[in-house]
Image (cartoon, rainbow, N blue to C red):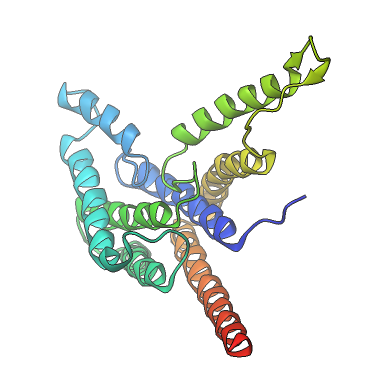
Amino acid sequence: MNRVQPQSLFLLLLTMTSGCVDVITFLNLGQVFSAAMTGNTVLFGLAFVHTPGLSVIRYVTALCGFMLGNALAALLCSRVQRQSGWNLTLNVVLIGEFALLLTSALLMDLQSPISTSFLVLLFSAAMGMQGVVARRVGINGITTTVITSTITGMVETTIWNLQSKARVDFDEKKTVQTNSTPWSTIILWFSAIAIYGVGAALCGEIQRHSLRVAVWLPVLVVLLVILLSYVWQTAKERKQKAHRTVSA
């Protein structure tokens, strides 16, 4: 069985972060998501037709904040836009995300008299930056900020794999060889879906006892990813450099 690649582990941890942050903003900042922009778009439509309890400005702020995060991350990644896979530039983007989440956590922990919309902007911008990191890594189906497309891909590919396995050439009495997606990829997609829910459940449970503790969970997870990915990337580059030296 294939081992989980470090890049995949990093993206799964970031997906968990999205579940945490969505819970924090939905429960505490006026039923708005910071990562799930599809949900915000639906809720914006409801708010636009004056559904009680929903604010148009919050959903506009979340959407704009997410796109602002996209833009900032895109600028930072402009020199590596043609590269895929984890690189140190992505760590710089994650440091930016960490700074935004840290600021948000401090403001909420200290119960600062800051506007709700500003907090929504900070959280959403952080998730926007994270979404670009996932795109740059380029693992099919893992976006870290939305799981709808992951569910679709997982179910669709599972059905095709099962059909491929069951398809038999009755004339030659043998299985027809077809290109199928590795089951390890499907398991990775399922893991991303599950860990988003785990992040949401864990953060929700912690918040039942203390919101001031819950807001620090996504901050710590992103910090963990930054540290682990930096150690892994530098070790990888050191190994490659040593290999080139020996080859020379």
Quadrant in which residue 92 is drawn: bottom left
In the rendered image, residue 247, in percent from the top left (x then y), is placed at 62, 85
Decide if residue 119 is in sight here.
no
Front position in the image: 67 or 62: 67
Residue 244 percent coordinates (x, y): 57, 84
Looking at the image, which is closer to me, 52 or 10? 10
Residue at 32% in and 39% down: 37
Tell me the quarter of the image containing the C terminus: bottom right
Q: Nearer the viewer, residue 159 or 72?
A: 159
Q: Is residue 126 above or below residue 208?
A: below
Which residue is painted at 78% across and 50% down in the image? 1
Extreme residue in the top direction: 171
Specify whether 171 is left or right of 182: right
Apparent side of residue 48 relative to residue 197 in the rendered image (left or right): left
- The answer to which of 194 and 25 lies nearer the viewer is 194
**At 31% across and 52% down in the image, what residue appears?**
128
Whether residue 3 is visible: yes
Tell me: residue 4, above or below residue 147.
below
Which residue shows up at 31% across the image and 46% down it? Answer: 29
Residue 196's spot in the image, x, y percent? 53, 44
User: Would residue 172 appear left or right of 141 to someone viewing this image?
Assistant: right
Quadrant for residue 84, please give it. Answer: bottom left
Q: How many labels were placed on the picture?
A: 0
